[in-house]
Image (cartoon, helix red, strand yellow):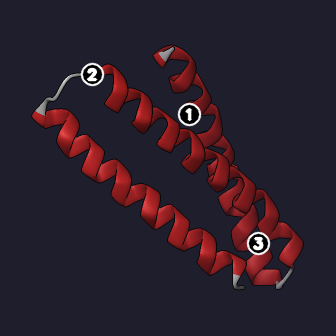
């Protein structure tokens, strides 16, 4: 199961990298349709990140490393949602 999550995360991370370039081009050209690939890829990546977070919380016992990982992961997910809202308002 974790291998599947890891492969999906690698694929979505590559999609985020490519769509970030498209996002910058869309902002530079003031073309809103070029923002949509970034919105989709970041939304899917954040959703998968939250699913993995719940999976790891349910499957593992308490460990200080996982507690730190949980806090950092929640912070990154909140930051992604904030970025999504900023791009949506563009």
Question: Seen in the image, is 52 located left or right of residue 30?
Answer: left
Q: Please tell me which residue is depicted at 22% across the width and 35% down the height of the picture.
A: 66
Mark 1–mark 2 Cα distance, whole angstroms, equals 20 Å
- Residue located beneath label 3 in the image: 25
Of residues 63 and 35, the one nearer the viewer is: 63
Q: Secondary structure at mark 3?
A: helix
Specify the farthest residue to the left: 64
Pick whichever of labels 1 and 3 is earlier in the sequence. Answer: 1
Specify the farthest residue to the front: 58
Residue depth check, mark 2 versus mark 3: number of the one nearer the observer: 2
- Residue located beneath label 2 in the image: 60
Give the vertical position of 87 relative to 36 (above or below).
Answer: below
Q: Please tell me which residue is depicted at 44% across the width and 66% down the height of the picture.
A: 79
Question: Seen in the image, is 8 located left or right of residue 57?
Answer: right
Residue depth check, mark 1 versus mark 2: number of the one nearer the observer: 2
Mark 1–mark 3 Cα distance, whole angstroms, equals 24 Å
Mark 2–mark 3 Cα distance, whole angstroms, equals 42 Å
Residue 9 is labelled as: 1
Q: Secondary structure at mark 1?
A: helix
Q: Please tell me which residue is depicted at 61% across the width and 28% down the height of the picture.
A: 8
């Amino acid at each position: 199961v974790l291998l599947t999550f890891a492969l999906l995360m690698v694929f979505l991370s590559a999609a985020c990298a490519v769509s970030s370039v498209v996002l910058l081009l869309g902002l530079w050209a003031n073309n809103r349709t070029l923002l949509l690939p970034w919105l989709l890829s970041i939304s899917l990546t954040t959703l998968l990140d939250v699913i993995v977070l719940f999976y790891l919380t349910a499957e593992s016992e308490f460990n200080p490393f996982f507690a730190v990982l949980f806090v950092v992961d929640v912070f990154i997910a909140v930051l992604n949602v904030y970025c999504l809202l900023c791009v949506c308002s563009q």
